[in-house]
Image (cartoon, rainbow, N blue to C red):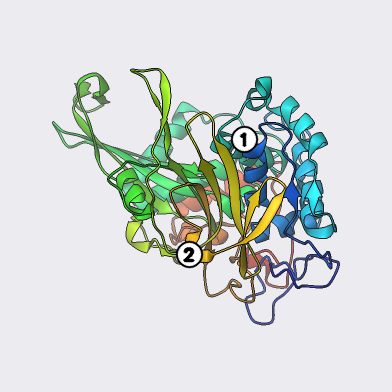
Amino acid sequence: MASELSQTSVSFELSEQASPHVVRCSSFSNASTAGRVGLQNLGNSCFMNSGLQCLSHLEPLAAYFLSNTYEKDLNDTSSFGCRGEFAKLFAELQQVVWQSDQRIYKPSELRSKLSGFAPHLFRDNEQQDVQEFLAFCLDALHEDLNRVLEQPPPLSEEELRNDELLCELRGEEAAGALAWLRHLERNKSFLVDLMQGQLRSSLTCASCGHKSRQFDPFLYLSLPVDWEMSNVTDALERYLEEEQLAGEEQWYCEKCCKKVDATKKIDLWRLPPILILHLKRITFNARTGKLSKIGRSLSSSLTLDLSGYCSSPQELGANYDIVSVTNHKGKAGDGHYTATCLVGDQWYRFDDDAVSAFHAQEVVNHETYVMFLVRQDPRGIHNDGHHTPWLRQQSVSLPEAWPHPYRVRQCSVLGELVEKAAESSSASFFRVTSPRAEQGGYV
């Protein structure tokens, strides 16, 4: 995403140095301020500005919109999203950030329309939590770009029982793959391809040892923070710690047929190409009825190896580069948000309309609130200012492109479910993007 790139077009293209299945921005524009456009504060809108800056500086996401690839995926019928309108607004913002010569942009129309889509985030012109804003943006973009135009009916009781039996017989890898299939039956978008991972959650009865497990998709992880922590991985470790359920939090065990003490555990099962980590510095105190903030400085290198925190093999590795962060300065419920983003090989601080160069050593500090990480892998592009992972379009009909090493078609029952899902999905399609498109990649 180097700022010195000079061509005016942006495209997904074949790379001579890497696999053809890579989403790569060949160029952004010849704009003198490409990637370094400030956003004017419209009155307590710094949370919106910082969140939008971070999203706009994720190279594959920006390229997807700047190349107009998103237009093929627009879903203007979904009642869950903004009927494609938010995706169009975000595309317009990318043109401003990367293809205009403006140094400062006033996002009045963007905010006006956002307040209609999510009035709770703009009520009374008050400061809001940037994480809540980002959660809305990610969900809205997903729904606006969801390639599933017609949602399938809920699974029948018989289908649910058959799924449970298959998971018991075939083990956890099959269970994770089946859960991903069920997710893709309803959710297929570029946001799923780019940012969606999978968690394994389990509950274990303390009396009989019975275990219940579930595999769930996620778009971001919210990590607990306390004053004793010293680095970001401490927060990740705390998130993955076992939790004891007792007293009013007891779990109903199907084998014991009663509520019992239990152990709850969350594991990282599949990590996505872009990983979003929310550091939960701001919490609500139920006793006092007030918000409080933990301003502990958590250190981190700009490259993280997360393989040791995963409970299953990561086919494309788990090495990540931090490419942008949102920051919160001041007290909980008030304060000020900024963003720090990588443009080419140079870091910049975005403080509303003020944009200035920033030192890499100071990117992660006591103000860091949300972190955006891009996965490194041998088939992606991670040089000359580019941070672009290898991507595979997710489809119910192409399990070979799923992030699961489990070979679905070797399991006859699971293979039949894949074929059935592909046949019944009226919106299922695979966009041919290269001579090797059967491998499920973008170019």
In the picture, residue 427 is in which quadrant? Answer: top right
- Seen as rendered, the residue at the extreme bottom is 16
Nearer mark to the viewer, of 2 and 1: 2
The number of numbered discs placed on residues in the rendered structure image is: 2
Q: Amino acid at mark 2?
A: Gln
Circle nearer the N terminus (2, 1): 1
Nearest to the observer: residue 87 or residue 107: 107
**Residue at 51 percent of width and 55 percent of height:** 272
Residue 228 on image: x %, y %: 27, 45
**Residue at 65 percent of width and 51 percent of height:** 350
Residue 366 on image: x %, y %: 43, 48
Q: Tell me if I can see residue 312 in this picture.
A: yes
**Residue at 78 percent of width and 61 percent of height:** 33
Q: Amino acid at mark 1?
A: Phe
Q: Does the CB distance between marks 2 and 1 fall below 8 Å? A: no
Nearest to the observer: residue 117 or residue 329: 329
Task: Report the quarter where the N terminus lies.
Answer: bottom right
**Where is mark 2, residue-wise?**
361
Disc 2/disc 1 C-alpha distance (Å): 31 Å
In the image, is residue 230 above or below residue 266? below
Left or right of residue 52: residue 175: left
Residue 411 on image: x %, y %: 44, 56
**Where is mark 1, residue-wise?**
136
Nearest to the observer: residue 269 or residue 65: 65
Q: Tell me if I can see residue 190 in this picture.
A: no
Left or right of residue 199: residue 146: right
Nearest to the observer: residue 218 or residue 36: 36
In the image, is residue 305 above or below residue 252? below
Determine the secondary structure under disc 2: helix
Task: Report the quarter where the C terminus lies.
Answer: bottom right
Mark 1: few/some/many CA within 10 Å (<14, 14-19, 20+): some
Determine the secondary structure under disc 1: helix
